[in-house]
């Protein structure tokens, strides 16, 4: 599907969606329309499809998660869990197609793995200290920034 779709159009759509989601949450408009069960399935399917086509699933996943009234710990845990599932599905493909280059950089992979664990421990402590409101504002601001950056990169 990616090969027949216009990647500039898809990237522009992603940028617009990210900017809309970020602005909606920053202005409080998103609070008026939280996702119900049916909308959640549709948002999940569309965010997965668009994220997969464009190659930027993290931003669109976070934008979709803002549509739910979940606390910051549940937000981070859900995003992390989904990321692990996606990466778990990707890794066998990388191992089959890129095994030799991966073996050559095993020290870097090990170092990055340790950094992930250390970063997770530190991040969890920082997350506990951030008030719920400021967490949502920060995520919405980052999503808005990602959308603006994606739009800039798409058409520059």
Image (spheres, rainbow, N blue to C red):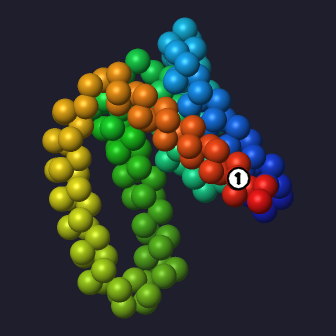
Judge left or right: residue 41 versus residue 14: left
Percent position of residue 19, x then y: 63, 35
- Does 115 sit above or below residue 148? below
Q: Tag 1's secondary structure?
A: helix
Res 53 seen here: no
- Does 22 sit above or below residue 105? above
Report the residue at 37% width, 52% height from top: 84
Judge left or right: residue 14 versus residue 93: right
Query: How many discs mark residues in the rendered view?
Result: 1
Report the residue at 55% width, 8% height from top: 32
Percent position of residue 67, x then y: 51, 23
Q: How crowded is mark 1: few (under 14 residues within 10 Å), some or many (20 or more)?
A: few
Judge left or right: residue 9 versus residue 23: right
Q: Quadrant of the C terminus?
A: bottom right
Res 68 seen here: yes
Judge left or right: residue 53 versus residue 59: right
Taking the view exactly as shown, the residue that stands out farthest to the top is 32
Out of 3 and 7, give the one closest to the viewer.
Answer: 7
Q: In which quarter of the image is the N terminus?
A: bottom right
Percent position of residue 58, x then y: 49, 47
Task: Indicate the quadrant where residue 16 lies.
Answer: top right
What residue is pinned by disc 1? 152
Task: Indicate the quadrant where residue 72 lies.
Answer: top left
Report the residue at 62% width, 51% height from top: 149
């Amino acid at each position: 599907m990616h090969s027949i779709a216009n990647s500039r159009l898809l990237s522009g759509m992603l940028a617009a969606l990210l900017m809309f989601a970020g602005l909606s949450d920053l202005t409080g408009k998103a609070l008026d329309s939280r996702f119900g069960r049916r909308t959640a399935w549709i948002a999940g399917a569309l965010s997965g499809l668009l994220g997969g086509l464009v190659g930027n699933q993290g931003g669109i996943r976070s934008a979709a998660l803002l549509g739910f009234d979940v606390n910051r710990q549940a937000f981070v845990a859900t995003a992390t869990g989904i990321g692990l599932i996606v990466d778990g599905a990707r890794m066998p493909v990388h191992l089959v197609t890129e095994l030799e280059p991966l073996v050559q950089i095993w020290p870097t992979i090990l170092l990055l793995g340790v950094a992930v664990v250390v970063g997770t421990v530190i991040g969890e402590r920082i997350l506990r200290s951030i008030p719920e409101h400021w967490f949502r504002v920060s995520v919405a601001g980052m999503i808005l920034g990602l959308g603006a950056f994606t739009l800039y990169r798409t058409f520059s």
